[in-house]
Amino acid sequence: MCLLIDVKEQMPKSNRYGKAKIWTDSDLEQVLSELDERMRCLFSICLYTGCRISAARQLRAENIVNDCIVFQSETTKGGKRTRQVEMHDTLKTVFGETELPATGYLFTGKNGGCITRQTADAALRKACDLTGLRGYSTHSFRRTALTRLSNAGVPLRVIQEISGHADLGVLQKYLEVSPAQVKAAISNI
């Protein structure tokens, strides 16, 4: 059986071109073990809430409310609405293991403001280099979260609510579909 797949859609990220790879469990475990606790917490937020690195790095202690993370509209890409995501049990554990401030930015940078996107990116690149992993970026955490939700059968509308996407068409571009999934789907006809 021949499966037609858009090659461009499947190209791994290289030199900032292409789509960020979806984390495999083993690659994710390797890279997280190379990060310090603060960066591990930052990227865990992206993984367990499906948020962008820009939203995670701007979180304040005050945004953690009753085991939920509140992403303020002014810190999200579209800037149109505030959304709240319940904390995954693993993320609660990571928070418990990480020394974070009680007020202000959770991830402070050198100037006292929030950590920069470039600092987070550099930390991830260093961890990937140490483990020999290629094709991953800070956006891999978001793509992985959304793809895992889709693969678990979570309806797209629910994933959209978690991710904050305004358009389902844009959300669908985040979701990776493997040739095995296409083959399995075809077998149901």
Image: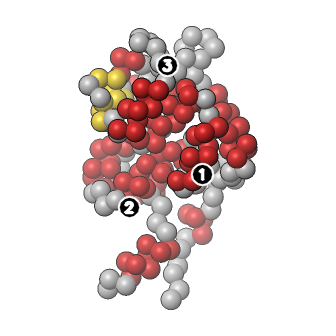
Comes first in the chain, label 1 or label 3: 1
Q: Amino acid at mark 2?
A: Asn
Q: Residue at x 35, y 22 (%)?
A: 63
Q: CA distance from mark 1 to mark 2?
A: 19 Å
Q: Which of disc 2 and disc 1 is earlier in sequence?
A: 1
Could you tell me if residue 121 is visible in this image?
A: no
Is any part of residue 145 visible from this angle? yes
Residue occupying image coordinates x 31% and y 61%: 153
Q: Estimate how packed mark 1 is, as few (under 14), some (14 to 19) or many (20 or more) residues with alpha carbons within 10 Å.
A: some
Query: If you read the primary sequence from the N terminus, does the residue marked by circle 3 or circle 2 appear first?
Result: 3
Residue positioned 56% across, 46% down in the render: 29
The image's colour scheme reads secondary structure
* Closest to the observer, 126 or 109: 126
Q: Which residue is mark 1?
A: 27
In this image, 179 relative to 64: left or right?
Answer: right
Give x and y (percent) for residue 46. Answer: 47, 38
Report the amino acid beneath label 3.
Glu
Question: Is residue 95 placed above or below 23 in the rendered structure?
Answer: above
The residue nearer to you, when weighing 12 against 125, is 125
Nearer to us of marks 1 and 2 is 1
Secondary structure, mark 1, is: helix
* Residue that carries the numbered disc 3 in the rendered image: 99
Q: Residue at x 73, y 44 (%)?
A: 129
Question: Which one is nearer the viewer's eye here, 168 or 29?
Answer: 29
Q: Quick check: 68 left or right of 42?
A: left
Q: In this figure, which residue is indicated by the disc labeled 2?
A: 151
Vertical relation: 59 (above or below) 49: above
Q: Classify mark 2: helix, strand or loop.
A: helix
User: Which part of the image, by quadrant, shows the C terminus?
Assistant: bottom left
